[in-house]
Image (spheres, rainbow, N blue to C red):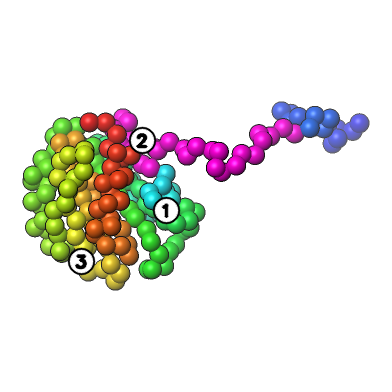
Amino acid sequence: MCSSDLPAAGSPSRSTPPTSAPPSSPASTPPAPPLTEAGGHLGVPRSIGSLRLNALLTQKFVGQSVRHQDANSFFIPDSDVASGFYTTDPSVATFSAGEPRLMFLVAYLAGSGNPASDLHSFMTNHTFHGQYQISPGSMGGVAACGWLSGQSSPVAHCMWADANTYADFYSWNSKPAALAQTMIATRPQVELKK
């Protein structure tokens, strides 16, 4: 046998058949657990409704520089901010204006939040229009929704705030009422510990 016929170091010998895990059906594979941030206080779900977490667009639109800005606005470490950008296809690098997508930023405030002040700021902020308060759901605090002004396609915006967290959710080509339901349903996957 010449040296070119020998397997490379660390490779299985040619007489050993390659092994692989048996294929699993998608129905039998449980979903991966959410990613966590802020010492396990915040989660980043791998999917929200029919939309899937898109790592590339998360980095592009709500990545480190945006998380840093959010952290600075609350005087907290960057590591206490989590974010996600969701698209139908998690591997796309672009999208058209008509495609559904969702984005969120959430800050872990470790008891220093002021929900009444946060709600007042949102309700009087001219960056939005048509703001109205909604039920925050079983996790408490305050919540509200409205429209992001000056956009070429409709962008719904909802927020929640409590002593421990402040979150902004944005959804393109959706209505605030629909985003409100999505945000409240998703909240237990994002705000993990009180």
Q: Amino acid at mark 3?
A: Ser
Marks 1/2 in contact by CB < 8 Å: the verdict is: no
Per the model, the C-alpha gap separating discs 3 and 1 is 26 Å
Question: Which region shows up in magenta?
Answer: 18-45
Q: Is residue 9 above or below residue 27?
A: above
Residue furthest toward the bottom?
A: 152
Residue under numbered circle 3: 149
Q: Is residue 39 magenta?
A: yes
Q: Amino acid at mark 2?
A: Thr
Residue 150 seen in the figure: yes
Residue under numbered circle 1: 50
Residue drawn at 32 percent across, 65 percent down: 173
Quadrant of the snapshot with the N terminus: top right
Near-viewer residue (190 or 28): 28
Q: Earlier in the sequence, mark 3 or mark 2?
A: 2
Q: Is residue 138 left or right of residue 46?
A: left
Q: Earlier in the sequence, mark 1 or mark 2?
A: 2
Q: Nearer the viewer, mark 1 or mark 2?
A: 1
Q: Amino acid at mark 1?
A: Ser
Asked which quadrant contains residue 38, the reply is: top left
**Image x and y of residue 73, in percent:** 18, 45
Q: Nearer the viewer, mark 3 or mark 1?
A: 1
Q: Is residue 103 left or right of residue 132?
A: right
Residue drawn at 28 percent across, 57 percent down: 178
Asked which quadrant contains residue 42, the reply is: top left
Q: What type of secondary structure mainly makes up the magenta span?
A: loop
Q: Which mark is residue 36?
A: 2
Residue drawn at 10 percent across, 40 percent down: 114
**Image x and y of residue 19, in percent:** 72, 32
**Image x and y of residue 65, in percent:** 30, 49
Marks 3/2 in contact by CB < 8 Å: the verdict is: no
